[in-house]
């Protein structure tokens, strides 16, 4: 894999160790992620990939017993420094969760929420942002006539695209996706994958997935985790055709998982 | 007889015993209600609701008692609701992990089980004497507020707990802080449960007599309360004093008082049930 210059690095982990209480869940992980790429984190359950994803927007702060060593750098800044305001950080880094989790409010309110908590009251601006975000997440045509409807009345796939729209409304530069399609049917999954492909133009996307084919289809680079180790990180093509490590080979060919 | 037969008989037997136990409780309640209604219903009219207590049973009414009960309810609610909800939120959303919170939590559970007369003694010392509120509505309401605070805190926590964590995560993930998450997401989603808990707590406060005796609710009073510093009586006190009268006519007045008290309680519980159902329909996870 090509070496990235400092400017090209969007996200970076340096000698990262993560513990939950006494248990070490990530061991000396080093990675650098280039802007406007899709990076897939793969690996068996419990390998630490979701935990790793969540260190980039500090969602692990709420987990009891969480502790880390090493640094996480976003846009050249160490985000675990005391001066960093975690709310500001998360506006820059959108997150989409495994299970669609829309707020029990209207579709409009879901997308407008991020602006609302920033204290933005300009109605026109909010309406424009909602429309733009829903268009970006390819949901606009399906919901434009009933934005007042409860978000919970949407199908699972629509809900997940709503959650993506909600994240996009804040105009982040990074999107973290934690198995965004694992709770969805194949058609909805395909829509989400198309969407990720398009969003790559503007966003740096990191996606955790259990689905090998999905990782192969949508990502530029793939990182394989096993038991807290980053075993291999390379271009997706290389990982899937000619991995360097035997463990990676065994995993992607389905010999264990 | 096979063991399967035996088990089946046991199963059936328990079903009938359980049914009998259920009906026993209901049956007693029906007899009690029937008795009260037969005795008291004839007394209930405008005069009964608008007259002051009197030594002559025919003229005696519950005007000061029901107004006193409503005053007490209102004041208790005003004092207990904000404190209870705030404490519940603190416990559930902020203090989750600390040792201090654990310690407080155990004590809170204990407080909910303290006999109400003890709260009366506490109220007497703190509100009546130290803070010098005297035997006023305010003393009574503060005392009852203390009494129902643990109930409100616990039910608020339960309602907050019922809100799935994924909602909080989504909100945090969008850059909201804890307070914004609580205010915009968690509270609206749990409002139904919180309100239900509050109403049930308050309807418990209605029936309390013991602590109010201690903090000086009157049994005979000739004016209606007009401020939180007024002297007062409440329905249970009035009923209690009538039951002790030698004149049998007063037993009817007591029964009528019980009907009014029950009505207020049923209305409050009805509102609670209504809100809970409405809330459950609106929010499905």
Image (cartoon, coloured by chain):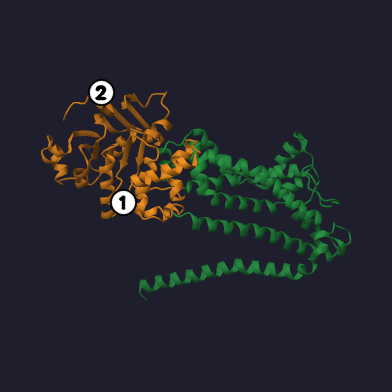
Chain colours: A orange, B green
Structural crowding at the residue carrying mark 2, measured as other residues with C-alpha within 10 Å and reported as few (<14), some (14–19) or many (≥20): few
Can I make out residue B248 in this image?
no
Pick the front one: A216 or A22 = A216
Taking the view exactly as shown, the residue that stands out farthest to the left is A242
Vertical arrangement, residue B148 with respect to residue A83, above or below:
below
Judged left or right of residue B151, residue A180 is left
Question: Badges 2 and 1: C-beta atoms under 8 Å apart?
Answer: no
Pick the front one: B124 or B17 = B124
Can I make out residue B208 in this image?
yes
Which one is closest to the eye, mark 2 or mark 1? 2
Structural crowding at the residue carrying mark 1, measured as other residues with C-alpha within 10 Å and reported as few (<14), some (14–19) or many (≥20): some
Pick the front one: A54 or B197 = A54
The residue that label 2 is drawn on is A6
How far across and down, in percent of the image, does residue A242 sit? 10, 38
What subunit carries mark 1?
A
Q: Earlier in the sequence, mark 2 or mark 1?
A: 2
Mark 2 residue element: helix
The residue that label 1 is drawn on is A183
Vertical arrangement, residue A235 with respect to residue B203, above or below:
above
Q: Please name the residue shown 53% across and 59% down the image.
A: B277
Query: Could you say which disc has been placed on residue B86 in the image?
Result: none
Pick the front one: B9 or A10 = A10
Task: Say which quadrant the N terminus of chain B sits in.
Answer: bottom left
How far across and down, in percent of the image, does residue B263 sit? 69, 61
What subunit carries mark 2?
A
| Quadrant of residue B52 within the rendered picture | bottom right
Mark 1 residue element: loop
How far across and down, in percent of the image, does residue B108 sit? 57, 41
Judged left or right of residue A66, residue A230 is left
Tell me the CA gap for discs 2 and 1: 37 Å
């Amino acid at each position: 894999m090509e070496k990235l210059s400092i400017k090209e690095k969007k996200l970076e982990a340096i000698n990262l160790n993560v513990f939950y209480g006494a248990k070490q869940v990530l061991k000396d992980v080093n990675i650098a992620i280039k802007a406007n790429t899709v990076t897939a984190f793969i690996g068996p359950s419990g390998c630490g990939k979701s935990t790793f994803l969540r260190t980039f927007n500090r969602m692990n702060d709420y987990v009891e017993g969480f502790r880390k060593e090493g640094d996480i750098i976003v846009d050249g800044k160490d985000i675990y420094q005391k001066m960093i305001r975690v709310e500001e950080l998360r506006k820059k880094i959108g997150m989409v969760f495994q299970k669609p989790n829309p707020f029990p409010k209207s579709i409009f309110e879901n997308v407008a929420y991020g602006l609302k908590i920033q204290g933005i009251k300009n109605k026109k601006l909010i309406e424009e942002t909602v429309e733009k975000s829903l268009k970006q997440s390819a949901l606009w045509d399906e919901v434009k006539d009933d934005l007042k409807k409860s978000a919970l009345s949407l199908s699972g796939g629509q809900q997940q695209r709503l959650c993506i729209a909600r994240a996009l409304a804040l105009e982040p530069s990074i999107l973290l996706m934690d198995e965004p399609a694992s709770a969805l049917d194949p058609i909805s999954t395909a829509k989400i994958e198309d969407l990720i492909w398009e969003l790559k133009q503007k966003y740096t996307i990191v996606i955790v997935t259990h689905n090998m084919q999905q990782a192969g289809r949508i990502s530029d680079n793939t990182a394989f985790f096993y038991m807290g180790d980053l075993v291999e990180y390379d271009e997706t093509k290389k990982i899937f055709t000619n991995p360097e490590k035997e463990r990676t080979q065994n995993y992607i060919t389905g010999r264990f998982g | 007889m096979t063991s399967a037969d035996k088990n089946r008989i046991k199963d059936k037997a328990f079903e009938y015993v359980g049914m009998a136990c259920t009906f026993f409780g209901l049956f007693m309640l029906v007899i009690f209600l029937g008795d009260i209604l037969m005795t008291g219903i004839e007394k209930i009219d405008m005069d009964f609701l608008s007259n002051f207590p009197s030594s002559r049973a025919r003229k005696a009414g519950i005007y000061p008692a029901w107004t006193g009960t409503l005053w007490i309810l209102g004041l208790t609610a005003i004092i207990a609701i904000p404190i209870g909800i705030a404490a519940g939120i603190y416990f559930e959303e902020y203090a989750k992990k600390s040792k201090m919170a654990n310690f407080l939590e155990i004590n809170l559970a204990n407080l909910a089980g303290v006999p109400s007369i003890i709260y009366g003694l506490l109220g007497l010392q703190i509100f009546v004497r130290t803070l010098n509120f005297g035997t006023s509505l305010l003393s009574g309401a503060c005392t009852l507020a203390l009494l129902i605070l643990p109930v409100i805190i616990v039910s608020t926590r339960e309602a907050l707990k019922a809100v799935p964590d994924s909602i909080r995560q989504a909100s945090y993930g969008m850059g909201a802080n804890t307070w914004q998450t609580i205010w915009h997401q968690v509270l609206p989603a749990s409002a139904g449960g919180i309100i239900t808990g509050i109403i049930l707590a308050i309807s418990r406060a209605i029936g309390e007599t013991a602590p109010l005796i201690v903090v000086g609710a009157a049994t005979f009073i000739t004016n209606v309360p007009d401020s939180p510093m007024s002297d007062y009586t409440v329905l249970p006190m009035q009923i209690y004093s009538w039951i002790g009268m030698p004149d049998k006519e007063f037993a009817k007045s007591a029964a009528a008082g019980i009907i009014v008290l029950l009505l207020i309680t049923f209305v409050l519980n009805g509102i609670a049930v209504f809100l809970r159902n409405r809330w459950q329909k609106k929010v499905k996870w």
